[in-house]
Amino acid sequence: MRAMVLERPRAPLAAREMPAPRPAAHEVLVRVGACAVCRTDLHVVDGDLPDPALPLVPGHEIVGVVTEVGADVQTRVVGERVGIPWLAGTCGACVHCRAGRENLCERARFTGYTHDGGYAEFTVADSAYVFPIPEAYDDVTAAPLLCAGLIGFRAYRAGGPGRRIGLYGFGAAAHLLAQVARHDGRDVYAFTRPGDETGQVFARSVGAVWAGSSEEAPPEPLDVAIIFAPVGALVPKALRAVIAGGTVVCAGIHMSPIPSFPYEILWGERVVRSVANLTREDAHRFLEIAPQIPVRPSTEVMPLEEANEALDRLRSGRVEGALVLVP
Ligand SMILES: [Zn+2]
Ligand SMILES: [Zn+2]
């Protein structure tokens, strides 16, 4: 099969021919139809996340068709279309797994990080961690739901209620969440890089009531702010933008250092928290509501061999919605 392979961090991915993987007894083999490009892929490739399983096929927003099932697989069948997300497996035994917080599992495995992912023609996945894809979506449109959607939705729920919700970094996750928030009758305030007028126009086109630079204060105080950009300096900015009792959610897996800030901007029961990974319940719930809203991902298709160019574009912020690789 063809695959794009990370051989060492901070180097471009290499186009390789390799044997397709074989499914273990509990796994399914999936022919990849589409794999969206996530900012976390960039953190893996750029060496921000430690110890990737090199050589590595990145990619964890995978949609494809099951072509083979392992001997012990009962729940999935050949020909079924499934999605494969970032959470690839958990131990079921650690303190977090036993508390129903499998997203925090101490021995969690991750697609496209601790083992090969979807920048390839085929991949294998644990059958207990793949999800049927709603028929309303084709492969390309469904792919960004698998991480931008799922983890975005977890961040959205973590932020709690309140009418005014600010989204810092208006990329793949924010453009999906803006649609969920609007459906819930909430007002979305979109913050982009300073000068990114294209991004601000895009944010308004998917329902933001206001879009501006992350250097600006919103016209109204926010109830909730979710930070998708990996920029620690946004944390005090977002804290200044939320009302007393408001919550700031850091939704990314990596962030630059957070500058110190005066206690008074946290005072008033403001909360700063992170969101880590996803649970299977997040996946089931989001994949159920997404077609009902309906959430419509904005996608741009690129051939698998252009994975490096896709990562470059994400690095420099030249993306509206989500980039999706097709083998
Ligand atoms: Zn565990
Ligand atoms: Zn992701």
Image (cartoon, helix red, strand yellow):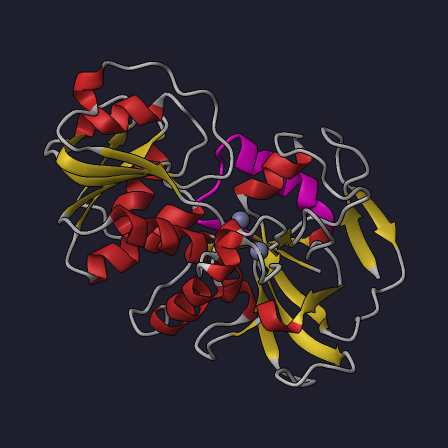
Please identify the quarter of the rendering in which residue 68 is found: bottom right
Q: Is residue 138 above or below residue 308?
A: below
**x and y, in percent, of residue 276 in the image:** 46, 46
The residue located at (76%, 40%) in the rendering is: 13
Is residue 12 at least partly visible in the picture? yes
Judging depth in this view, the residue of 146 and 315 nearest the camera is: 146
Judging depth in this view, the residue of 101 and 181 nearest the camera is: 101
Q: Which residues are magenta?
A: 305-323
Is residue 256 toward the left or the right of residue 194 in the image? right
Is residue 269 toward the left or the right of residue 194 in the image? left
The residue located at (19%, 61%) in the rendering is: 184
Instruction: Specify whether residue 81 is painted magenta.
Output: no
Is residue 167 at least partly visible in the picture? no
Please identify the quarter of the rendering in which residue 315 is found: top right
**x and y, in percent, of residue 199 in the image:** 36, 38
Which corner quadrant holds the N terminus? Answer: bottom right
The residue located at (42%, 69%) in the rendering is: 287
Which corner quadrant holds the C terminus? Answer: bottom right
The residue located at (29%, 27%) in the rendering is: 214
Q: How many marks?
A: 0
Q: Is residue 314 above or below residue 259?
A: below
Is residue 29 toward the left or the right of residue 270 in the image? right
**x and y, in percent, of residue 168 in the image:** 33, 35
**x and y, in percent, of residue 208 in the image:** 22, 46
Judging depth in this view, the residue of 199 and 174 nearest the camera is: 174
